[in-house]
Image (cartoon, grey):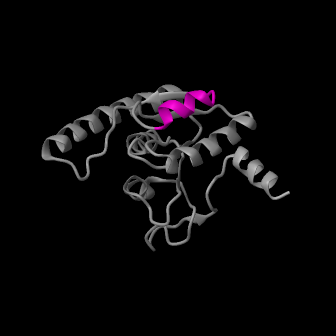
Amino acid sequence: MAGGTGGHVYPALAVATELLSRGYRVEWVGTARGLEHRVVPAAGITLHCLPVRGVRGKSALHKIFGLLFLLLAAVQALWLVFRLAPRCVVGMGGYVAGPAGVAAWLLRKPLLIHEQNAVAGTTNSMLAPLASTIIAGYPGAFKEDIQYTVLGNPVRRELVAAGAASHY
């Protein structure tokens, strides 16, 4: 699950395509408004859309609607995780990862989160106490009381191949 910008979506896509290449079933939880709406189906991955939006930095009315959409998304995420019965849920950030991550935790599914930025975003910071595994792209991404492993950021195979080809 990842949504919004390329900073969350493309690393998640790298993980998803690698899992697919190893024979795992991959289902993506995202939004109909973010970048994932275009690139995930194009990669042959099923996209399940939740009606979640950001609530920070908006007018009071936008915040109220944002919270209502968040509540609706939480109910839909619970049903989705229950119905799909995944062995593991991977959260890569963005607002959409919040409801789906909480749903995974409530339904006792292992929750792995990955933070791609130097400082953890709001959603991953909130999900960290619920996660069974926390991975970061950079040291210092999470607060000191959070146990996590620094593994770097996932990169799509086509970018690795293009970079290697340009050096030879």
Left or right: residue 70 versus residue 30 is left
Residue drawn at the location 72% of the way across and 44% of the way down: 158
Image quarter of the C terminus: bottom right
Give the x, y percent position of residue 54.
Answer: 30, 45
Left or right: residue 25 versus residue 56 is right
Q: Among all residues in the image, which is located at the extreme left? A: 60
Residue drawn at the location 57% of the way across and 62% of the way down: 137
In this picture, is 61 found above or below 76? below
Give the x, y percent position of residue 59.
Answer: 16, 47
Magenta residues, start to end: 35-44
In this picture, is 147 found above or below 103? below
Query: In this view of the protein, which residue sits in the foreground, 10 or 115?
Result: 10
In this picture, is 77 found above or below 115? above
Question: Taken as a whole, is the magenta stretch helix, strand or loop?
Answer: helix
Query: In this view of the protein, which residue sits in the foreground, 95 or 134?
Result: 95
Left or right: residue 92 versus residue 23 is left
Left or right: residue 154 versus residue 9 is right
Q: Based on the displayed image, in which of its 4 quarters is residue 42 positioned?
A: top right
Q: How many marks?
A: 0
Q: Among all residues in the image, which is located at the extreme right? A: 168
Query: In this view of the protein, which residue sits in the foreground, 34 or 111?
Result: 34
Q: Is residue 37 magenta-colored?
A: yes
Residue drawn at the location 56% of the way across and 67% of the way down: 138
Give the x, y percent position of residue 57.
Answer: 23, 53
In this picture, is 69 found above or below 56? above
Q: Based on the displayed image, in which of its 4 quarters is residue 40 positioned?
A: top right
Give the x, y percent position of residue 88.
Answer: 57, 41
